[in-house]
């Protein structure tokens, strides 16, 4: 682990305490109703860090938490919380991490280095995808295009605002929640949404 990563890991608990007190109203967005999206999330595909193609249709019947990640961010310690969440709900939840260098170049490493970092530093067992573009623009990954355009998902235009934003998709491929980086994966807002 590099020095900036060590410092970020140590400062993370303080950062989250501050956010708990001063959390923005836009930190959590909830679908106004359970409307079927114009296009199901399950029609999409992604490529895992090891090069394997992942058809999201194979995840139907489970909830899916999609998270854009980075190894040099103040929120990188959320990897540990995501792993704990994944272990707790392993029979009903899949977590998909999408590393991205979109925010202040906080994920400059190669896919191979990212995979090693996730495994050795946080014992990540959930799927990590290839590094992608998550913000808008021509290169935005199709998964993130679907997540951030209401004409695809039915209600949400929220793009990731920083690393470790989280989108929850239900068993039927409907986007139900958005949680920004200030919301811990272990927050009761998240766990209640997974359990509902």
Image (tube, rainbow, N blue to C red):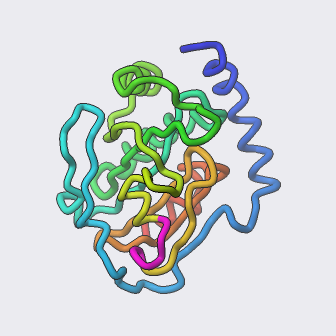
Q: Is residue 79 above or below residue 86?
A: above
Residue 164 percent across, percent down from the top left? 55, 46
Would residue 50 be found to the left or right of residue 29 on screen?
A: left
Q: Is residue 17 above or below residue 6?
A: below
Magenta highlight on residue 125: no
Q: Quadrant of the N terminus?
A: top right
In the displayed orientation, state which residue is furthest to the front.
Answer: 138
> Overall secondary structure of the magenta stretch?
helix
Q: Nearer the viewer, residue 59 or 54?
A: 54
Q: Nearer the viewer, residue 120 or 142?
A: 142
Q: Quadrant of residue 131?
A: top left
Name the residue located 33 percent from the left edge and 35 percent from the top edge. Answer: 125
Residue 69 percent across, percent down from the top left? 50, 40
Name the residue located 26 percent from the left edge and 43 percent from the top edge. Answer: 47
Would residue 121 be found to the left or right of residue 163 on screen?
A: left
Q: Quadrant of residue 194?
A: bottom left
Q: Quadrant of the C terminus?
A: bottom left
Q: Nearer the viewer, residue 11 or 194?
A: 11
Counting the numbered discs, the total is: 0
Name the residue located 52 percent from the left edge and 31 percent from the top edge. Answer: 107
Q: Which stretch did the figure color magenta?
A: 148-153
Name the residue located 46 percent from the left edge and 46 percent from the top edge. Answer: 133
Residue 104 percent across, percent down from the top left? 64, 36
Residue 65 percent across, percent down from the top left? 41, 55
């Amino acid at each position: 682990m590099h020095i900036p990563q060590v410092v970020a890991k140590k400062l993370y608990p303080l950062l989250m305490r501050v956010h708990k007190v001063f959390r923005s109203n836009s930190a959590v967005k909830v679908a106004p109703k359970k409307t079927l999206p114009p296009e199901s999330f399950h029609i999409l595909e992604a490529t895992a860090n090891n090069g394997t193609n992942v058809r999201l249709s194979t995840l139907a019947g489970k909830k899916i938490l999609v998270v854009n990640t980075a190894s040099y961010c103040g929120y990188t310690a959320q990897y540990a919380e995501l792993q704990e969440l994944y272990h707790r709900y392993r029979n009903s939840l899949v977590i998909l991490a999408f590393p991205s260098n979109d925010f202040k170049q906080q994920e400059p490493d190669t896919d191979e280095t990212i995979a090693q970092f996730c495994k050795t530093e946080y014992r990540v067992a959930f799927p990590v995808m290839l590094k992608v573009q998550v913000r808008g623009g021509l290169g935005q990954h199709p998964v993130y295009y679907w997540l951030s355009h209401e004409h695809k998902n039915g209600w949400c235009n929220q793009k990731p605002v920083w690393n470790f934003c989280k989108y929850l998709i239900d068993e039927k491929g409907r986007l139900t929640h958005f949680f920004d980086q200030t919301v811990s994966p272990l927050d009761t807002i998240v766990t209640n949404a997974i359990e509902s």
